[in-house]
Image: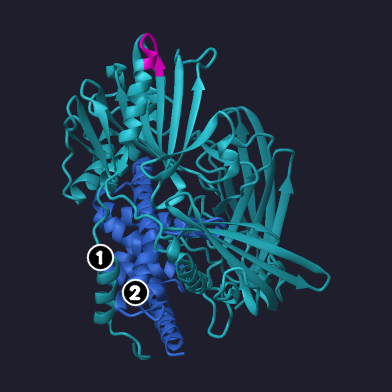
Chain colours: A blue, B cyan
Amino acid sequence: MDAVYRLTHAIVNDPADAADAAQETFVAAWRQIRSLRDPARFDAWLQRIAVNAARMTLRGRGRRRVREIATSAVTETAGSTDGGRPTDDGARLASALDRLTADQRALLALHHLDGRSVADIAAALGIPGGTVKSRLFTARRALDAALAADAAEDGR
Amino acid sequence: MTGTPWSDERLAAAYRARFGAVAPEGLATETIAAVRAGRTPRAAGSIGPRLSWLGVAAVLAVVAVGTGLALRFGLYPGGGSVTDGPPGFKTFTYGEIAFDVPAEWSIRDASTFFSGGSVIAVVGTLPVDPACGIGHVDINCYYEQRLEPGTISIVVGSGAYRGGTIFDAERAAPPTVRTTVAGMPALFTDRGRTAESYYLSDLDLTWEIAQPATPSAVYRIDVGIRGPGVDEYRRQAEALVASFRYVSPPPALDPAAAAEVALVALDEAEFSDRTMWQLATGEVSWYACFGDVAGAVASREVDSTPGEHLVAALPVECRWSIAAEGTAFWRLELETSWTVGATSGTVREIRWLRPDGTATASTFEGDFPPSSADEPSGEERPLGTAQDETFYFEVMASEATYAPDEPIEIVASFTYLGPNDTERVYHAASPIGFRIEEVGGSRVMGGAMDQPCLNTDAEAGQPIDMPFTKSGAPTDDPTAGFDRGWYEDPVLTLPPGRWRVFASLSVSLGGCGGEVHGLDVSVEVSVEP
C-alpha cells in the first residue's frame, strides 16, 4: 500500500488525490485480477494500474471548475516558502512536477523514487526498454527545464 | 536554488523528502472496505466477472500486509475505537470525530466508501442480521433491514456537496433548518413520520455537520426510530448529537483579523493560480488585480482567468469583501468586471477560508471573458460529435497532425442530457469503444466487448471523459494491423499516414438489455515524418 501511495502521490502531486488513486488502484486490481496471467509479474501489473489510476485522477482534476482546495497543498506550500516560493528541494520538485505531463511524472517517480531499472519500468508500463530510455531522457530534460523556470521566477 | 540541472542523487533525495511518506493512517482499512464494497454486487450473483478467492486474497493481502496492518477483529474493526465514556455511556472515536452513545447500544463497523461520501458505522438497538456481516456490516444489506418495534437505527457517515457548500441557500429549505453542532455550521432535518416508510419508522431525523477542513463536506447522522419509545429515543439521539465533537476543535474566527486574513487568502489565491495553471513569467494572474483595501475598486490588465489563458491582456476592475460565515469559516467574495468590445460581464467568486485564511473551497458564477481555449488555434482540433434525445457524444484529438513518435491524445466524452438529475448507464467493460482504420490502407485496430454488464452513474450535463484505449488482437502481419509491442504500449503512436479514429458509445438504460443507445463519431489525424 505504501509503495502504491508513494507512486500515485509522486504522479498526482497531492496527498488527498494520491490516496484516492491508491484506493482506486486496489479496487481496480481486484476487479481485474483475472487478467493477471503471471503471478510473478504482480508488482509490475499493480504499478501499471496505479499509473493509470493516477492519470485518471489528474484528468478528472483538470475538468473541475468548482474545486476543493486541499488543506495539505496550502499548508505544505505555506510552510516551506520564502516570499511565496518553495525553499526546499522537496517543495521545488513538487512545484516543478506541476509543469510535467502525467506520463513524465510516472516515469520519473518509478525511476528516481522507486529506484526501478529501465527493464522494470518497461515491464510495469508495458513498453519497450528503448522507449522507456528515450521517454525518461525527455522527462528528465522537461523536469530540469521546469526547475530552471521556477528558479528564474524565484529570482525575479 | 541554482540554475544547473540537479544530480540524480539530489533528485532522488528530493523525491524521498516529498513523496517518501507512508500511506495515510486508515487508508489501508478504507481500501479494504472499498474492495469489499465493490465485491458485493457480484457476490450477489450479477453478471460481473467471477473472481477466484485466491485473487481476492492476493489483493487484500497486499493492502494489509503492505502497511504492516493487522485487521483488528474486535468490537469495532473499522479504524475507530470504542472506549468508556461518561457514566452510562461509551465513546466512539473515528478519525477527527467522537461522540457518546448509551452503553447498551451497539456500534458496528460499516465502513464503506463511495463517490462523494462514506458510511462509517451503524449505531443503535436494531439487531443486525448476521447475514449482513459479523465483524463488518455490509451497508447495502443493512439498508434492506426494516426497523423492529421499539428500536433505533443511526447511520453515521460523511458526504460532500458537489459544486457547493453547506451554506448554499437551497439546502435550508423546509423541513431542513440551520443549526450549529460542535461549533460548526450544520443542517437538521426532521422528516417526522414518513408515510408508507419502507423502514416502518415513526420518526426520521438527519444532521449534516460541516467538516473543519471544508464547508463542502459534512458528517451525516441519519436516525430512524420505530416506537414504542419514540420520545425517549429522540432524546437519546439528540444527546448523541450534542456530544458530537471534533477531537481537535478548529480555532475560532478573530473578527479583528478579517482584513489580514483576506490579504493572505488573495496572495495564496494568486500563487496557487500561477502554480496550478503554469503562468509564465511576466503573465499577470486574475487574482493580481485585487487591491489591499476591502470594497475599493482596483484595476489591472490580466492575462488569465482562473484556469484559462486569455486571448490577449484584458483590463479588468475588481473588488473584494470578507465576512464571517457562521463561526468557523470566512467568506471572501471576489467580484471582477470585464469588457471585450461590446461584450461585458462580471465574475463573482466566493472563497471559503479557514480561520487562518487558507482557502478550502470556491464557487464561481457569472460570465468569464473569452479564453484562448475558445479561440481556434492555427490548426483546429479534430472533433466529431453526435447526439440523440438522451446523450451528447464527441471524440476529439489534441492535434490534427502528429510526428511518428509523438503521443496521439484522443478523448471521447459522453454527456447525459436528462430528463433525470442522474441516470445509471449500463454498459460492457466500457461505455465507449475505439477503432482505428488506416485511410486508404488496410491496417485496423479494434474490437468490442458485450460483457460484462457494468454501470456508471451519469449526472445530467456533466461530461464523462474516456481516453483512448487500445483493443483488439495483435497480428504479425504489418499490413493488417499492429504487433504485440504496439498493443502493450499504453501510449498511442501511429506510423506515417492518415488514420481515422472511431469512437462508439454503446449503453443502455434500465439495466443491461434495456433501452439501448448507440452513437458513433470519428476524427481523422495525420502522422507525418
Which residue is identified by label 1? Answer: B20
Check disc 2 and report its element: helix, strand or loop.
helix
Position of residue B481 in the picture relative to residue B184 (left or right): right
Q: What is the three-letter code of the residue carrying label 2?
A: Ala
- The Cα atoms of the two marked residues, 2 and 1, are separated by 13 Å
Which residue is identified by label 2? Answer: A91
Q: Quadrant of the C terminus of chain B?
A: bottom right
Chain at numbered mark 2: A
Q: Position of residue B313 (x, y in %)?
A: 68, 80
Q: Position of residue A107 (x, y in %)?
A: 37, 69
Picture residue at 28% right of the left edge, 75% below the top: B14
Examine the rendered structure and indicate whether residue B518 appears above or below residue A13: above
Judge depth for marks 2 and 1 and give the one in front.
2
Picture residue at 42% right of the left edge, 86% below the top: A154
Nearer to the camera, A19 or B313: B313
Density class for disc 2 (Cα within 10 Å; few <14, some 14-19, many ≥20) is many
Examine the rendered structure and indicate whether residue B418 appears above or below residue B319: above
Position of residue B17 in the picture relative to residue B296 (left or right): left
